[in-house]
Amino acid sequence: SAVARSAVSRHQARWSLCGQEITYLGTTLRLTDVSKLLLSEYRRARRLLFDDLLFGAAELAAVEAWRLHDDLDVEDYGGSWLTDERNADMLRGSEDALLRQIEQRADLRKLFVGERRKETGAATLRREAMAAYEADVQEFLRAVVPLLFISPMPPLRAPEFLSITFSNTGGRRRSMFVWEKMLMIHVRYRKSAEQTGK
């Protein structure tokens, strides 16, 4: 343990003596740049979400967290703000909204819809288009990460961040809630609790 305390990690962040700059893996960031970084990543995440992932569909952009209702005590499997009856009118049609956008717009049909199956006549989605869409999802998540890690709360570690769920599963309750008109992430993993069992 003495070696562990004295050894310097290869990926160690270093603060400047003035306390206004931090350097990590050759990149230096001034504290005054943090708000610019957050605003830039917020704008990028918003553009990716609304323009690319939601195909610019205005009706989907109307679903805002502050309008949603949630029951923090819901424990049934799959339960979340998505299943709360008070949100039914606002969420009606959202489950297949992206497919409707693809059906209604010629440019999206050409991009996403492949050949029809001979046996059923059903259209298939092109694998290449789905792979590109998934790449956009990953870019969106990459833009969201700084917003979660650079915040007033302690930073989330990988086990905390990767265990976030939006609905109840068979083994545990969800970690995303709508609370006091804001989206709340409640993580149940904590490094100290995991190590000590308390």
Image: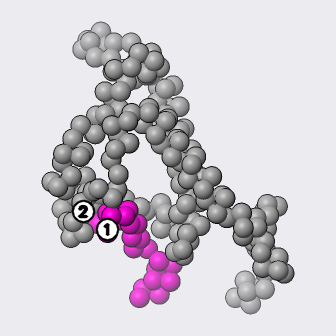
Bounds of the magenta span?
A: 171-198
Asked whether residue 197 is drawn in magenta, I would say: yes
> From where the camera sits, is residue 77 visible?
no
Residue at screen point 24% across, 62% down: 70
Q: Is residue 49 left or right of residue 117?
A: right
Disc on res. 70: 2
- Image coordinates of residue 142 in percent, x first then y, are 57, 51
The disc labelled 2 sits on which kind of residue? Answer: Asp
Above or below: residue 148 compared with residue 55: below
- Image coordinates of residue 41 in percent, x first then y, are 60, 52
Q: Quadrant of residue 18?
A: bottom right
- Image coordinates of residue 169 in percent, x first then y, are 28, 59
Q: Residue under circle 1?
A: 179
Categorize mark 1 by other alpha carbons within 10 Å: few (<14), some (14-19), many (20+): some
Q: Are marks 1 and 2 in contact (CB under 8 Å)?
A: yes
Mark 2 falls on what kind of element?
loop
Disc on res. 8: none
Q: Quadrant of residue 170?
A: bottom left
Q: Looking at the image, which residue sits at the far left?
A: 85
Which image quarter is the N terminus in? bottom right
Asked whether residue 148 is drawn in magenta, I would say: no
Which image quarter is the C terminus in? bottom left
